[in-house]
């Protein structure tokens, strides 16, 4: 008799004796709980909690909207799924034992599988090649390298590599953007971008300058750039306008000629094996009439008016203009290459003010006129402070203050104030000795200043009366005498250098018996140097004759004497 077998059922048998025999089988295991899934590298690890009574498990997977299908079995509580590609997976598990299978787990685990993108993608440049580097991706079998000329442009694949780095060579000048994708058995990762990298030519010259020659040729100069094999010269008529290439040079400078009047701007670029670098800052030059001369002055020298001025950069010559009206018409007097001009005074009118202007000239024209410099052609003034000292009965000394514009003086003499004045001599000093005069005689003297324009008006007349006699004095003896107002009397005595002397006199201010009021002066006859009296005392500074001059402010009698200390 075969055994009765029933799964998931209960069997009841009734016997004729009235007894009932009940057989009951074991149930299948419980469904697993706590389904979990974890993606790492190229595999998904599925794990779960044990189903009661399970001896093994069946693992099911769903992709997209498809049904769950079994992908494997396990005797423990985890399963590794390696048959994956990029996408999202859902996992459920059944428990299994000898009594049968459980239902699929009521919960499921989801996981998204993606290829890991490279990290730390970077680019560096050397010359015309770029080195792209990145961190290795676990499980990656190769890498795809992409490049674009724009951050938002199309990235094209330029190569593959099994490991970092990748060298991109033979590039032109410009800015490049690089990205890297990792390729593994599960697929291709997203792209990881580097920072942009620029391939530049050599730097521009740091300093660019221009100069203009007298013929209108522009010289463009610049500092040399290390590594540059040549330079390109660009020109524009506007600082912010379009610059067109006008030439090339292997070194500074560059000459640009045949230009029309105007302002030009120049920029320089450096060139090496990589290519051409950026443009330098602009240097300007103006092909126009020069600026007007500065510091124009006019001064009288000899028989000329000398007009001078500062040199003007770029000027080839200068034109000198003259007028008698500062705001009137200026007439051209000369065109010269130097910075000074002499205008002959022979054709000029005295007591007239002349105005001079100067214009700088180059091949592009004349500058604006300079500020006017003026000069008045007037004869020099007469000397001031004319003084006459009686030296003897036949000579006098005339002195006066110097006149700044005078280069000489002319001394005149007359026998009366309103008479005819005879010129004595023309001298360059401010003192003059007149000799050969008659004793006790009044003379009148005038002095006129002279410069390159001629002789000015003479000074007012200064009278002087020569002494009647030259009377010697005897040491320690009074000499009694009398004097009229306007007359001069001279006395003399001999002195020795270094010896002390005393000079004494009595007039009515000191002695009531005397009637004259006198003034006494002393000087050395040889040098005409005045002697300073210290309470009538003095020490001789030289050996020779001392002259005592006595004049009276009121007529009468007086005494005079000298003594030795």
Image: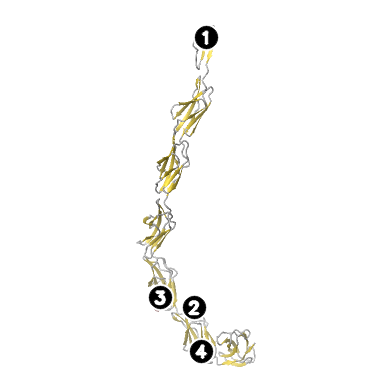
Residue 392 appearing in the image: yes
Image spot of residue 107 (x, y percent): 50, 27
Real-space Cα separation, disc 2 to disc 3, in angstroms? 22 Å
In the rendered view, tell whether residue 511 sits above or below residue 34.
below
Q: Nearer the viewer, mark 3 or mark 4?
A: 4
SS of the residue under disc 4 = loop
Image spot of residue 419 (x, y percent): 47, 89
Image spot of residue 57 (x, y percent): 50, 24
Extreme residue toward the top, this view: 17
Task: Tell me the quarter of the picture where residue 206 sits.
Answer: bottom left
Please name whichever residue, 88 or 345, is drawn nearer the observer in this view of the structure: 88
SS of the residue under disc 3 = strand
First along the sequence among labels 2 and 3: 3
What label does residue 14 carry, if any? 1
Real-space Cα separation, disc 1 to disc 2, in angstroms? 166 Å
Q: Quadrant of the C terminus?
A: bottom right
Please name whichever residue, 283 or 344, is drawn nearer the observer in this view of the structure: 283
Circle 3 is placed at which residue position?
343
For disc 4, the neighbor class at 10 Å (few under 14, some 14 to 19, many from 20) is few
Real-space Cα separation, disc 3 to disc 1, in angstroms? 162 Å
Real-space Cα separation, disc 2 to disc 4, in angstroms? 28 Å
SS of the residue under disc 1 = strand
Residue 324 appearing in the image: no
First along the sequence among labels 4 and 1: 1
Image spot of residue 77 (x, y percent): 52, 27
What label does residue 404 carry, if any? 2
């Amino acid at each position: 008799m075969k055994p009765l077998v029933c799964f998931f059922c209960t069997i009841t048998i009734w016997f004729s004796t009235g007894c009932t025999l009940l057989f009951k089988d074991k149930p299948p295991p419980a469904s697993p709980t706590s389904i979990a899934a974890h993606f790492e590298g190229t595999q998904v690890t599925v794990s779960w909690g044990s189903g009661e009574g399970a001896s093994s498990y069946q693992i099911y997977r769903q992709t997209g909207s498809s049904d769950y299908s079994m992908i494997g079995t396990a005797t423990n509580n985890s399963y590794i799924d390696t048959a994956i590609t990029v996408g999202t997976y859902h996992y459920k598990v059944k428990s299994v034992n000898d009594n049968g299978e459980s239902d699929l787990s009521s919960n499921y685990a989801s996981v998204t599988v993606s290829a890991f993108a490279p990290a730390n993608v970077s680019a560096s440049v050397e010359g015309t090649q770029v080195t792209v580097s990145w961190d290795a991706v676990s499980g990656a079998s190769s890498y795809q390298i992409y490049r674009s000329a724009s951050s938002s442009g199309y990235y094209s694949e330029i190569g593959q590599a099994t490991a970092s780095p990748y060298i991109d060579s033979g590039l032109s000048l410009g800015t490049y953007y690089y990205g890297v994708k990792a390729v593994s058995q599960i697929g291709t990762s997203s792209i990881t971008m580097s920072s942009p990298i620029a391939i530049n030519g050599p730097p521009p010259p740091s300093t660019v300058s221009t100069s203009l020659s007298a013929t209108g040729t522009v010289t463009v100069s610049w500092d040399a750039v290390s590594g540059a094999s040549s330079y390109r010269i660009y020109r524009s008529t506007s600082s912010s306008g379009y610059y067109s290439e006008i030439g090339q040079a292997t070194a500074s400078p560059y000459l640009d000629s045949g230009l029309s009047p105007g302002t030009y701007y120049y920029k320089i670029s450096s060139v090496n094996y990589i290519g051409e670098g950026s443009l330098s800052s602009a240097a300007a030059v103006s092909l126009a009439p020069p600026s007007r001369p500065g510091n124009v002055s006019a001064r009288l020298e000899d028989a000329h008016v000398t007009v001078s001025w500062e040199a003007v950069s770029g000027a080839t010559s200068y034109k000198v203009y003259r007028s008698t009206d500062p705001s009137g018409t200026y007439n051209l007097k000369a065109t010269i290459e130097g910075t000074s001009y002499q205008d002959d005074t022979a054709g000029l009118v005295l007591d007239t003010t002349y105005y001079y202007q100067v214009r700088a000239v180059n091949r592009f024209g004349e500058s604006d006129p300079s500020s006017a410099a003026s000069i008045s052609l007037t004869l020099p003034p007469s000397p001031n402070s004319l003084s006459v000292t009686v030296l003897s009965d036949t000579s006098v000394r005339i002195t006066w203050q110097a006149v700044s514009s005078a280069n000489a003086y002319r001394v005149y003499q007359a026998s009366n104030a309103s008479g005819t004045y005879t010129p004595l001599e023309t001298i360059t000093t401010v003192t003059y000795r007149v000799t050969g005069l008659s004793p006790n005689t009044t003379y009148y003297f005038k002095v006129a200043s002279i410069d390159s324009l001629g002789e000015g008006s003479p000074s007012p007349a200064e009278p002087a009366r020569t002494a009647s006699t030259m009377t010697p004095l005897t040491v320690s003896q009074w000499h009694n005498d009398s004097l009229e107002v306007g007359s001069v009397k001279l006395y003399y005595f001999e002195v020795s250098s270094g010896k002390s002397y005393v000079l004494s006199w009595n007039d009515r201010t000191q002695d009531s018996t005397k009637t004259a009021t006198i003034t006494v002066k002393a000087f050395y006859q040889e040098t005409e140097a005045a002697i300073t009296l210290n309470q009538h005392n003095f020490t001789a500074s030289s050996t020779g004759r001392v002259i005592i001059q006595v004049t009276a402010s009121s007529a009468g009698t007086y005494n005079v004497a000298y003594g030795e200390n």
